[in-house]
Image (tube, grey):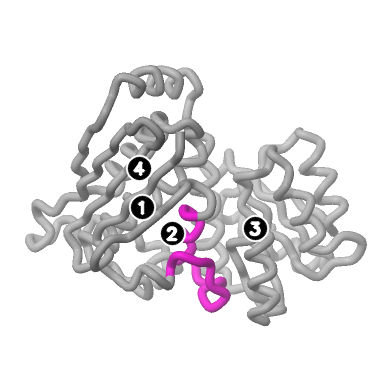
Amino acid sequence: MDKRQVELLVVDDEEFNRHILKKCLTDANYAVTLAADGEEAWALLDDGKHDFAAVLLDRMMPRLDGMGLLARIKPDSRFVRLPIIFQTAAADPSDIAEGMKAGAFYYLTKPINKDVMLAVVQSAVSEHVMATTLRHEEVDQRQRCFAMLRNIEFHLSTLDEARSLATTLAGFYPEPQRALLGLSELLINAVEHGNLGISYQEKSALLETAQWEDEIERRLALPENTGKVVSVLLEHLPQEIRTMVTDCGNGFDWEKYLEMSPERAFDPNGRGIAMSKMMSFDSLKYLGKGNQVVVTVKL
């Protein structure tokens, strides 16, 4: 991904904060547009001249605060997949839960740690960019082919294969962009957590030091991981599309990841399963010890 083609909107009423954030983000090769409050930010969003990949949004501002701007953004179909990253000094669990309920799944606490911020921005931007990669003509062709398909099975082992297969499978769904984020999350989880045993805490540390993909490549080359695959079975049933993802791992304590948690709000990872459940599928269920997940979308 060429970050120079990725534009971010930074909204903060403190001029010093705006320019510190802009310097950090432009140093990381993002394009940055600034707004001093929610009203100015909404004007930039609404004019249609920008294609923002994420919004870094201060919660406490005059005129229109962060929650007020979020209330305008999320019901608007133009911004349904636009990630909102709340930056706030208010770390009260009830405030965090309120923001999550309104659609702010990413949080940064002030004073902001540069490495953590860049990891969170990268995570949010990756999801947005992924949602815009499907070409309409390719989707139409896949969906015509899928009408004749009853079931198909795939095996994958690498991060690139997971991303590629997620894009391919999403093209079979009635709303490809909706399905893509969830499919990508589940396939990547199966590789990194399931087959390679990267824990939640390890991933947080790796993301903050930009070493996550390097560690995945290192573990893929280890003898004990040779031959490990993720199995993906897609079934086209009369009333639904069902996808089952199975990895070679020992499972995990999946129940606590099904809902957004204020305790994990400031981590750079840990929200993907809950987002998939809420946004991508009509149902999401883990089976047994947690190394198998089944998702469905109604037709």
Magenta stretch bounds: 257-277
Q: Residue at x 46, y 41 (%)?
A: 179
Mark 4 or 2: the one toward you: 2
Q: Which residue is mark 1?
A: 186
Residue flagged by tag 1: what amino acid is it? Leu
Residue 270, position as x, y percentages in the image:
45, 66
Mark 4 or 1: the one toward you: 1
Q: Are marks 1 and 2 in contact (CB under 8 Å)?
A: yes
- Residue 183, quarter of the rendered image: top left
Residue flagged by tag 4: what amino acid is it? Arg
C-alpha separation, residue under disc 4 versus residue under disc 1 = 10 Å
Residue 206, position as x, y percentages in the image:
38, 67
Residue neighbourhood size for the residue with mark 2, other residues' Cα within 10 Å, grouped as few (<14), some (14–19), many (≥20) = many
Residue flagged by tag 2: what amino acid is it? Ile
C-alpha separation, residue under disc 3 versus residue under disc 4 = 24 Å
Residue neighbourhood size for the residue with mark 1, other residues' Cα within 10 Å, grouped as few (<14), some (14–19), many (≥20) = many
- Residue 92, quarter of the rendered image: bottom right
Question: Disc 2 on helix, strand or loop?
Answer: helix
Q: Which residue is mark 4?
A: 163
Q: Residue at x 76, y 34 (%)?
A: 48
In-front residue for pair 237/58: 237
C-alpha separation, residue under disc 3 versus residue under disc 2 = 15 Å
